[in-house]
Amino acid sequence: MGWVFKFINSSIGKKFMMALTGSFLLIFLVIHLIGNLTLFFGADAFNAYVLTLDAIKPLIRIIEIVLLAAFVIHILNGTRLWISNKKAKGQRNQINGSPQNSDVFSRTMFLTGSIIFIFLVIHLGTFFWRFNVSDPMGFADEHQYYNMVVYFFNIWWYAVLYVIAMVLLGYHLNHGFQSAFQTFGWNHKKYTPWIKKIGTIYAIIMALGFAAMPLYFLLGGGN
Ligand code: HEM
């Protein structure tokens, strides 16, 4: 068992755990986006979707616990790697002042990740909490889930906050996708450029798909 902890705490182990939890989160986002697309089909479709999730609550609870663990491991390891990279870079720059040769996406992973974390806290506080724990406005008690989403996305600054967060999410996913492949050792002269392209397409679909929802309601859709 000792070697497992040793591996997880090594720098390659930390990267591996980042890639593993990140891949799980990439899949979660696809499922979350597909489920939320019911918002475009009106109140009945979205409320029925939420009630379906409610009907399989024990399974959803297990997924949520795994999801929480994935987020925590991803964020903790990301922060630890960022700190050790910063230290290593400081030492390198003292020796030879070496210029950075990474792109803007990889250099801003910690920044975009931190903003997505803040978004997530606000997002869960708005929807997850009200759907599952307590909703002072009473939407959830009457199963008016759709109306709750419409209510929040009609608040202009709240909708704009989502759109900005989704642009940054796109940046984060663009690098994260290809980085996970690299960490798993799936590196190939022929396939790596394709993996990068697929990662960019994935990131654009996720960012546009999620941003479309607040924009749709903000611009009067669904009323
Ligand atoms: C406009 C875009 C989004 C909408 C409309 C939306 C909507 C929702 C709703 C309604 C819930 C509550 C579901 C329930 O508890 O039954 C929820 C939960 C959640 N959302 Fe989002 N979401 C969006 C974007 C995102 C993004 C980008 C992320 C990740 C970065 C995310 C992560 C989560 C997580 C982790 C949960 C809790 C897990 C769950 O209950 O399934 N969401 N979202």
Image (cartoon, grey):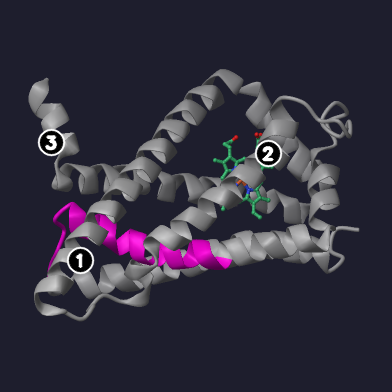
Number of other residues with Cα within 10 Å of mark 1, as a class: few under 14, some 14 to 19, many 20 or more: some
User: Residue 11 appears at what percent x and percent y?
Assistant: 16, 47
Residue at 47% x, 61% y is 112
Q: Please tell me which residue is depicted at 68% across the width and 61% down the height of the picture.
A: 161
Q: Is residue 18 above or below residue 113?
A: above
Taking depth in this image into account, of 170 and 202 the one nearest to the observer is 170
The residue labelled by disc 3 is 7
Q: Are marks 3 and 1 in contact (CB under 8 Å)?
A: no
The amino acid marked with disc number 3 is Phe
The answer for how far apart the CA atoms under marks 3 and 1 are is 23 Å
The kind of secondary structure the magenta stretch mainly shows is helix
Of pointers 1 and 2, the one earlier in the residue sequence: 1
The magenta stretch is 167-188
Using residue 162 as the reference point, say whether residue 106 is left or right of it: left
Local SS, label 1? helix
SS class of the residue under badge 3? helix
Drawn side of residue 147 relative to residue 174, left or right? right
Say if residue 51 shows up in the picture.
Answer: no
Report the mark closest to the observer, 1 or 2: 1
**Residue 170 screen position, x and y as percent:** 49, 65
Q: Quadrant of the N terminus?
A: top left
Task: Give me the C-alpha separation between circle 3 and circle 2.
Answer: 35 Å
* Residue for point 41% across, 31% down: 69
User: At 16% from the left edge and 58% from the top edge, which residue is drawn?
Assistant: 186
Label 3 vs 2, first from the N-terminus: 3
Which numbered marker is on residue 89? 1
Residue 93 position in % (x across, y down):
17, 73
Identified by mark 2, the residue type is Gly
Position in image of residue 178 (x %, y %): 29, 63
Residue 125, numbered circle: 2
Indicate the quadrant where residue 96 lies.
bottom left
Distance between the alpha carbons at the discs numbered 1 and 2? 37 Å
